[in-house]
Image (cartoon, rainbow, N blue to C red):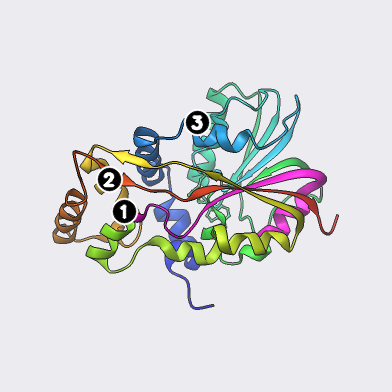
């Protein structure tokens, strides 16, 4: 494979300390989805609804970020949650949030999904949402996710595919010449499935249909400047990018198609 960009798993120090040192940049992107989504169901509820939860599920969340997944109405509050991330700042935010949401048994740990510090078969449910495209060796990560999952357990791995945030990526490409689609070469809808099938005999894709109808240009600009290449924009590029976003507004809104969803993986090949 050609060398990876910092954002697409090429630089873990950048991911841990700059992009995801805390939740600020991710929150900007999440806010755009939350404010302007046309989906009837929020993403955490969609993804959680794919899993059979019991009263005392032992769940591991890898690359938990700000812990947004646990803002769902499906998981019993007595479940035991292990929230992990490469970034200690994210672990802290996720643990606080889950506790605020009423979860009674929450543990946080800073760790790399490629080297999970847990015994084989330790968890009933493992979550790796929107994070495998940041990992240097996604196959190694999938081996680890399968290893710590008990044989009857379920792995949910959310990701995006080519065309996700299309109008946004077009505006980014217009000003900066490149955009974030390299992520999907690492682990996207098309590329991720083959990686998962190496470890699981049952892999099902569940699409989350959701166009964004953005009515606040500033929110779209902030999104585009929250990750590379826009993250290091000069003042002149930021002005140019704002104009590129505004030019995509029609009748007071910018329609952004998304291409996202989650893989549900069961039946490990090497139990
Ligand atoms: C796009 S965020 C997704 C957060 C959360 N899962 C969600 O869906 O909202 C990606 C997260 O993965 C984490 N991450 C990146 N590489 C990782 C690795 N090798 N191991 C564990 N976490 C990693 C980042 O620090 C970041 O918090």
Q: Which residues are magenta?
A: 141-168
The percent coordinates of residue 207 (x first, y second) are 55, 46
Q: Where residue 186 is drawn, which disc sits there?
A: none
Q: Nearer the viewer, residue 146 or 156?
A: 156
Q: Quadrant of residue 53?
A: top right
Q: Secondary structure at mark 3?
A: loop
Q: Quadrant of the C terminus?
A: bottom right
Q: Residue at x 21, y 42 (%)?
A: 218
Q: CA distance from mark 3 to mark 2?
A: 21 Å
Q: Which residue is mark 2?
A: 220
Would you say the residues marked 2 and 1 are in contact, meaning their CB atoms lie under 8 Å apart?
A: yes
Q: Earlier in the sequence, mark 3 or mark 2?
A: 3
Image coords of residue 242 (percent x, y): 18, 51
Vertical side of 160 occupied by 209: above or below: above
Q: Are marks 3 and 2 in contact (CB under 8 Å)?
A: no
The answer to whether residue 15 is magenta is no
Q: Helix, strand or loop at disc 1?
A: helix
> Which of the two labelled residues, at mark 1 and mark 3, occupies the earlier sequence position?
3
Question: How far apart are labels 2 and 1 at the CA level?
Answer: 8 Å
What kind of element bears circle 2? helix
Q: Which residue is mark 1?
A: 168
Quarter of the image with the N terminus in it: bottom right
Q: Is residue 254 left or right of residue 92?
A: left
- How many other residues sit within 10 Å of disc 2, few (<14), some (14-19) or many (≥20)? many
**Which residue: 31% across, 54% down?**
167
Q: CA distance from mark 1 to mark 3?
A: 22 Å
Q: Is residue 158 magenta?
A: yes
Numbered tag placed on residue 41 in the rendering: 3
């Amino acid at each position: 494979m050609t060398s990876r960009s910092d954002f697409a798993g090429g630089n873990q120090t950048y991911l841990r300390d700059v992009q995801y040192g805390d939740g600020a940049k991710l929150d900007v992107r999440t806010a755009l989805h939350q404010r302007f989504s046309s989906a009837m169901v929020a993403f955490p509820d969609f993804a959680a609804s794919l899993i059979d939860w019991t009263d005392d599920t032992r769940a591991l969340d890898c690359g938990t970020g700000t812990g947004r997944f646990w803002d769902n109405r499906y998981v019993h509050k007595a479940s035991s949650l292990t929230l992990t991330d490469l970034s200690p700042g994210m672990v802290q935010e996720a643990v606080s949030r889950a506790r605020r949401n009423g979860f009674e048994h929450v543990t946080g740990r800073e760790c790399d999904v490629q080297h999970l510090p847990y015994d084989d078969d330790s968890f009933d449910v493992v979550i790796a949402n929107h994070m495998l495209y940041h990992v240097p060796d996604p196959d190694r990560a999938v081996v680890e996710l399968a290893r710590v999952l008990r044989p009857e357990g379920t792995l949910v791995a959310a990701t995006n595919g080519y065309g996700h945030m299309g109008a946004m990526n077009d505006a980014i490409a217009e000003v900066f010449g490149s955009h974030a689609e390299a992520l999907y070469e690492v682990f996207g809808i098309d590329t991720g499935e083959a990686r998962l099938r190496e470890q699981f005999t049952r892999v099902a894709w569940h699409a989350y249909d959701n166009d964004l109808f953005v009515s606040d240009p500033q929110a779209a600009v902030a999104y585009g400047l929250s990750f590379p290449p826009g993250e290091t924009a000069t003042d002149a590029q930021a002005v140019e990018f704002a104009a590129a976003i505004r030019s995509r507004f029609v009748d007071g809104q910018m329609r952004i198609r998304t291409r996202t969803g989650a893989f549900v993986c069961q039946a490990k090949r090497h139990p």
